[in-house]
Amino acid sequence: MRVVIIEDELLTAEDLKESIQQLDDTVEVVAMLKSVREAVTYFQQNDMPDLIFSDIQLGDGESFDIYRTVEVSAPVIFCTAYDEYALQAFKTNGIEYILKPFTNASIADAIKKYNNLRRQFTGAGTDNPANTIAETVQQHTSKPAAILVYYKDKIVPVRLDSIVLFYIEKETLYLMTFDRQHYYLKKSLEEAEQLCGNDFFRVNRQFLVNRKAIKDASHYVARKLSVNLSVPFKEVITISKEKAPQFLAWLSGK
């Protein structure tokens, strides 16, 4: 398998190369590119690799600028310290989105995903499995595995499936996890909603709730519904009568 790495930090690029080749000794890293300009020139002058590992923020721009400038058919595994680019990544040949610092396990999972998709489409007789892999993931992948939150002086990745709800308090967005930890985010509720996909429901202007966290719903005043969570929360969460049918349809999986 021929791999290209796009990463502007040399030590990170070397660590990534070493991790990939430890996991699969058949991998040939054919290029390590550190800028948008260098990557554009490379793809214009060389054969397309089987797979690309790409950072997003480079010294002379975002790696998305590469894919806007030159046609890249290879699937891309994005490795970045930022979670806000996930949706855009999956629209740009992305098949996986790894948050830094990456681990051997996260790299192994990403390569396994690529190999599974490649076998699937090669076995189906697809002429160009790389294109089909990227197109399929763009259609079916809508959210990252984790979201970055801020705790004291640290930036912490929190898995989406560990989140009970997002809520606004004093114009700041917070989330609460199933183990009752609270973190604040430098995002809007709208941005969180886009990242989370259909597993979360925007019940009103203040709350975005995980389907897994909902114990039941009950009738409330003025024909509203109240949402009862499996984890205690300090406020009553209500849904207007106008939005209740949409919520119930979502809750039932329709």
Image: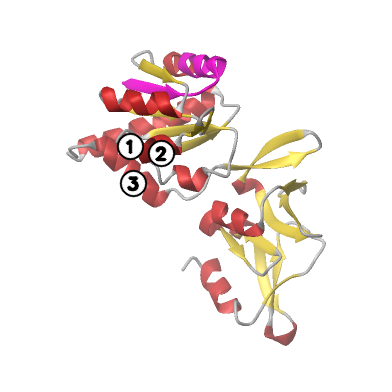
Camera-side residue of 105 and 28? 28
Foreground disc of the pair 3, 1: 3
In which quadrant will I find the N terminus?
top left
Mark sitting on residue 29: none
Q: Are marks 2 and 1 in contact (CB under 8 Å)?
A: yes
- Identify the residue at horizontal 38%, vertical 47% (top origin): 138
Where residue 51 appears, x then y in whole percent?
35, 28
Labels 2 and 1: the sequence-earlier one: 2
Kind of residue at disc 3: Thr
Q: Against 187, is 235 above or below?
A: below
Q: Quadrant of residue 167?
A: bottom right
- Helix, strand or loop for disc 1: helix
- Identify the residue at horizontal 79%, vertical 59% (top origin): 169
Magenta highlight on residue 252:
no
Kind of residue at disc 1: Leu
Q: Residues within 10 Å of mark 2 (few under 14, many from 20)?
A: many
Q: Are marks 3 and 1 in contact (CB under 8 Å)?
A: yes
Residue tagged 2? 95
Spatial separation of the CA atoms under disc 3 and disc 1? 9 Å
Mark sitting on residue 117: 1
- Identify the residue at horizontal 49%, vertical 65% (top origin): 253
Kind of residue at disc 2: Ile
Spatial separation of the CA atoms under disc 2 and disc 3? 9 Å
The stretch in magenta equals 1-18
Labels 3 and 1: the sequence-earlier one: 1
Specify whether 118 is left or right of 58: left
Residue tagged 3? 136
Camera-side residue of 210 and 41? 41
Where residue 118 appears, x then y in whole percent?
29, 34
Spatial separation of the CA atoms under disc 2 and disc 1? 9 Å
- Helix, strand or loop for disc 2: strand
